[in-house]
Amino acid sequence: MAKTTIRYICQNCGAESLRWMGKCANCGEWNTLVEETVTKQEQHKRTWVKRSTPLRLAEISTEDQPRFSTGSGELDRVIGGGLVPGCLGLIGGDPGIGKSTLLLQVAGKVAEESGPVLYATGEESLAQLKMRAQRLGINSQELTVVSESSADQIADLIREKKPKLVIVDSIQTMFVDEVPSPPGSVGQVRESTGRFLQAAKGTGTAVLLVGHVTKGGSLAGPKVLEHAVDFVLYFEGETHTSFRIIRSVKNRFGSTHEVGIFEMTETGLQEVANPSQMLLAQRPTNSSGSVVVPCLEGTRPLLVEVQALVAPAHFGGPPRRQTTGVDYQRFSIILAVLEKRCGYALQNQDVFVNVAGGIRLEEPAVDLGIAVAVASSEVNRSVDPYCAVIGEIGLSGEIRAVRGIGQRLQELARLGFEKCIIPKPNVTGSEPLQVVGVSTIQEALAQTIGSRR
């Protein structure tokens, strides 16, 4: 039998160690070393490639690598305008969120419009894949499917067939014979990704990998996986709602601020052409604790409803604070500002904040919307349904300017809103609807819900 040794691999940075340590000596992270068994043949195995010739940057041409569409305008927006030949991408998300559904639809569209596509699945049989394709109405003659878990076999197919696009579902089911650990382990994921990276760059084939996520929501496997690929996309959404959102956390070919919005239907994922109207379709009128905030996701303005509920805390315990769709730390700061600067007695109140539609808001420009929603619920007065608010709140209660105010106001005017509370520095005098510039949170509350008395 071949001699084996034990080594420990850091899941965060990929550093190796001959013994286990609580803290990685390379990146300083705790509890990231994972045991891996290595054969003697693997230790001495090296793949030598022909050395490339250095070129001046000005001599390199990109004209022979035009992007091609995935067939989905929303996905193209997130990637940066389409797939680049030879790219290696990673798409992760919770189980059942729709990753395989979306990529099978992409495979069908690319096969019809751009060229041959290979769909390699390690999780389904070909019969199961066919049933899903029939449900989605996919029957392209240029779409080839294979049920295979060997990374080397799939890489050989890529070099032999040279398809336009390859989809691997999923990277955690792939294995390399030289690595004795089971599929999904650190070594297998790292080596399998390396095989697909070499095949993609060597043939000019775009390769998309499906990745599983952990309970914490991060991609399973070593961080080396995310470092190796050209872009990383996260597929988000609540399983009990129909909305699905794609976000980019790494993109070598475009911005990481764009999002794509889809709706899950019986026939697959459909692009949402007017997300603002759909997000506000079920908004209650004349209800306290509800306010519309014009957000900006990349270059796209979205109108979302921020809801708040303030109720007396019972049972003598500490008051509950819960958020869905907004950052909890930012929410805690806003409550503190309302108490200190505006006199709202929230220390004995349960406070809940929710963003309707399953949307998650990251930008600080939604601060004023959260504050107005909480104050509206506390005094039980509704905000004008045709009025929106936007602004960042400072610790002194000042309202700070936000970016992209013109795009936000254009979207409000398009959907029939008549008024918007905005930071005073953002007022230009050429707005498409009535705006009220405010400098403090007290002024904003006076304009939306009036005096507390």
Image (cartoon, grey):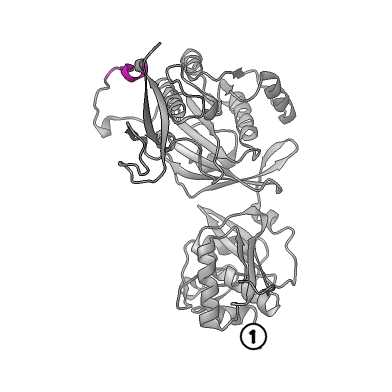
Give the residue furthest to the top.
Answer: 1
SS label for mark 1: loop
- Foreground pick, 27 / 328: 27
* Residue 374 position (above or below residue 54): below
Q: Quadrant of the N terminus?
A: top left
| Number of numbered tags placed on the structure image | 1
Where does residue 84 sit, x and y in percent of width and height? Answer: 46, 31
Residue at the spot x=64%, y=75% of the render? Answer: 349
Looking at the picture, does residue 201 appear above or below residue 264?
A: above
Residue 159, x across and y down, in percent: 46, 15
Q: For the view shown, which residue lies furthest in the bottom direction?
A: 453
Res 419 visible: no
Q: State whether residue 375 is above or below residue 161.
A: below
- Residue 270 in the figure: left or right of residue 234: right
Pick the residue in front: 421 or 315.
315
Residue at image coords 65%, 18%: 141
- The stretch in magenta equals 42-51
Q: Is residue 310 left or right of residue 50?
A: right
| Picture residue at 51% right of the left edge, 39% below the top | 219
Q: Quadrant of the C terminus?
A: bottom right
| Location of residue 291 in the rendering, given as x and y in whole percent from the top left corner | 65, 68
Q: Position of residue 345 (x, y in %)?
A: 60, 81
Q: Is residue 152 magenta?
A: no
| Three-letter residue code for mark 1 | Arg
Judge whether 129 appears above or below 306 on screen: above
Label 1, on which residue?
A: 452
- Work out whether residue 122 or residue 39 is closer to the camera in this orientation and state it: 39
Q: Nearer the viewer, residue 419 or 441?
A: 441
Instruction: Specify few, some or many for label 1: CA neighbours under 10 Å numbering under 14, 14-19, or 20 or more.
Output: some
Identify the main secondary structure in magenta: loop
